Amino acid sequence: MLRLAERPAAPAGQRGPARRLRWAALAVLAIGVAGCVIVLAGALPGGWVAAAARPATGGAGLVRVLPGTSQVLSGPRLAEVNSLASGIGSVWLTGGSGTQNHLLYAVNPVTNRIDATVVLPPRQVINPGDLAVGPDAVWVAIGASLYRVVPGQSGAAVTHPFATLPLDGLIGDVVTAAGSVWVDDTVHGTVYRYAAGTGRLQATVAVGGTAGAMAAGDGGVWAADPDARTVSRISLSRNRADLVVRVPVAPTHLAADGDSLWATGGTDSVLVIGAGGRVRSVPVAGQPTGLAAAGSSVWVASTGAGTLSRIDARRDVVLATVRVGERPYAVTAAPQGVWVAVLGQPVMDTAVRPGGGKLSWLLQLCGIG
């Protein structure tokens, strides 16, 4: 039979000091843990609080990746995030609420606070790409209607559409280019061009049987036809497709830089369409989805792997990959970093691992250094 080793009890006169010593040690430990949370919350750059100090729960979330260090900073948590875009001094995102309202949020990219929320009409469906930012307005698609939000002027709610597609269409994506806002109709394979200031219909361009993702760049507006597995470039001056490129997959996300178009769609690689429509690919594991092009870099969210990859747009090679959380899917690049929407829990710790400096001793004390 197993017997526990017996230890003689301490004399009664010796119990008091030992007990007091244990309570003192526990008190110091509790103060230290509280100090970890308080100091870390105030010492992190830009007012950001890492998830290790402020756990995030439920819904979707945003993270910001700092390109120079690959640090991942946790952002606000929301019930739902659909699309991301940056411009006019903010990071913009669309989502919904329990009452099915369509909501537009403006996030301050420095303070990590939601500066404004605009309520839009209830939605019947979720548009695949429902958000674009122009020089002075934000554009949100809801069903067949397009809404214009002017920061500082539109107020807390917008109810009247700026434009509406004919023939009971459904907007698939929105982009801005050349003083116009462009939307495509997923049902009829048509792109509509509206004057950004007046809403006047300027052009109607057929791009195929269906239409999906769009991107502006390389001297035109690109529109994908997922069923036909093609992408068409629409000339800004002639309002017609001047190049149609067949691709090996059904393109679901597009991004354009100076002279190339980037696409994802169903394979573990990113397609690159260069001059003359030549197609090449860059392997990126983990179901790549969302794309953003900025300068000489292309950023790719891999939903299956939970990562964000940075591709050198000049050499078609992956420079870095960092884990950002569960099921990332939308990306936008801003001057303060690259923002990623994740459907699940964001990554928890890389924002509080500077590896040295005045916080390193505290991080080690807290058990996260």
Image: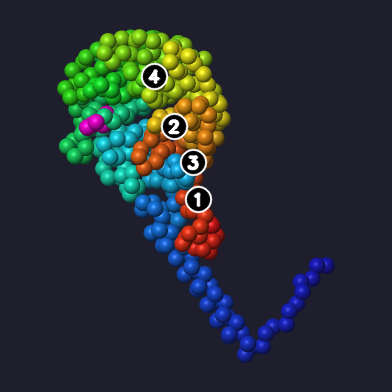
Q: Which range is magenta?
A: 135-139
Comes first in the chain, label 1 or label 2: 2
Comes first in the chain, label 3 or label 4: 4
Kindly report the distance in space between the C-alpha atoms of the residues bearing marks 1 and 3: 10 Å
Location of mark 2 (residue): 297
> Which residue is found at the position 57% from the left and 77% from the top?
22
What residue type is disc 3 on? Val
Location of mark 4 (residue): 212
Element type at marker 2? Answer: strand
Comes first in the chain, label 2 or label 3: 2
Comes first in the chain, label 1 or label 3: 3
Q: Is residue 138 magenta?
A: yes
What residue type is disc 2 on? Ser
> Residue 201, relative to residue 351: is it above or below?
above
Comes first in the chain, label 1 or label 4: 4
What residue type is disc 4 on? Gly
Prevailing SS of the magenta stretch: loop
- Is residue 327 something one can see in this rendering? no
Kindly report the distance in space between the C-alpha atoms of the residues bearing marks 3 and 4: 26 Å
Foreground mark, 1 or 2, reads 2
Q: Quadrant of residue 177?
A: top left
In the rendered structure, find residue 324 and report the number of the disc placed on it.
3
Q: Residue 294: image x %, image y %? A: 39, 32
Foreground mark, 3 or 4, reads 3
